[in-house]
Amino acid sequence: MNFMPEGQWNVQAQFAKGSAYSAVKRNFAAVWNLKADYRALELQMCLNNHDFYPECQEVDPGSFILIFEKTWQSAAFAISFDDSSDILKTAGGKAHTASFSNETGKWSKEDIPMKVHQKVLQLQ
């Protein structure tokens, strides 16, 4: 049985159809310094196992944009996984994460890869 917390929907099924969040405001987070062979669906499944339900889009090998329904979800992801090395498969060292503020147009960190930032600007 695929249990989803109240208010969540089956993101895996929506992922196959296209953006799960196309009709609502998108809230972005980013993760980078992951192994180059990590795929979006694999990352999404890992995060689902830790009660995060984003849509994952690969930007470059090892870097991803995550799209959440709520602003607090993207911020919670960034806080929970930044500088971690034990949950996500990293390319050596630690995973780097940040959340994007739609209100200010700024990231929670300054060292965001340029391609990640450009992808968020395209998706807004």
Image: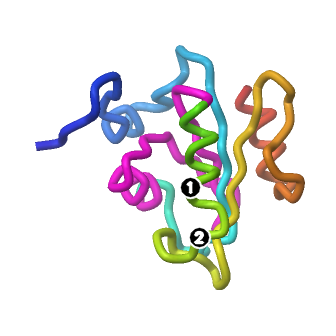
Can residue 61 be found in the magenta stretch? yes
Q: Could you tell me if the residues under marks 1 and 2 are in contact, i.e. CB atoms within 8 Å?
A: yes
Which label was assigned to residue 100? none
In the rendered structure, which segment of residues is drawn in magenta? 42-71
Label drawn at residue 84: 2
Q: Quadrant of the N terminus?
A: top left
From the top left corner, tell me how far across and down residue 55 is, in percent. Answer: 50, 40
Question: Disc 1 designates what residue?
Answer: 80
The amino acid at mark 2 is Ser
Q: Quadrant of residue 13?
A: top left
The residue nearer to you, when weighing 85 against 14, is 85
Question: Callout 2 environment at 10 Å: few (<14), some (14 to 19), or many (20+)?
Answer: some
Identify the residue shown where x is 54% and y is 36%.
Answer: 73
Which residue is drawn at the image coordinates 80% and 22% (left, top)?
A: 103
Q: Is residue 45 magenta?
A: yes
Q: Where's residue 19, x and y in %?
A: 50, 30
Label 1 environment density (alpha carbons within 10 Å; few <14, some 14–19, many ≥20): few
> Up-down: is 85 above or below 120?
below
Q: Residue 77, how many percent across, how many down?
A: 56, 48
Helix, strand or loop for disc 2: loop
- Regarding mark 1 in the picture, which secondary structure is present there? helix
- Name the amino acid type tagged 1: Ser
- Tell me if 92 is positioned left or right of 106 in this view: left
For this view, does 110 lie left or right of residue 71?
Answer: right
Given the current orientation, which residue lies at the most extreme top position?
23
Measure the C-alpha gap from mark 1 to mark 2.
Answer: 8 Å
98 to 54, vertically: above or below: below
* Quadrant including the C terminus: top right
Image quadrant in which you'd find residue 108: top right
Residue 62, placed above or below residue 8:
below
* Foreground residue among 80 and 101: 80
58 or 31, which lies in front? 31
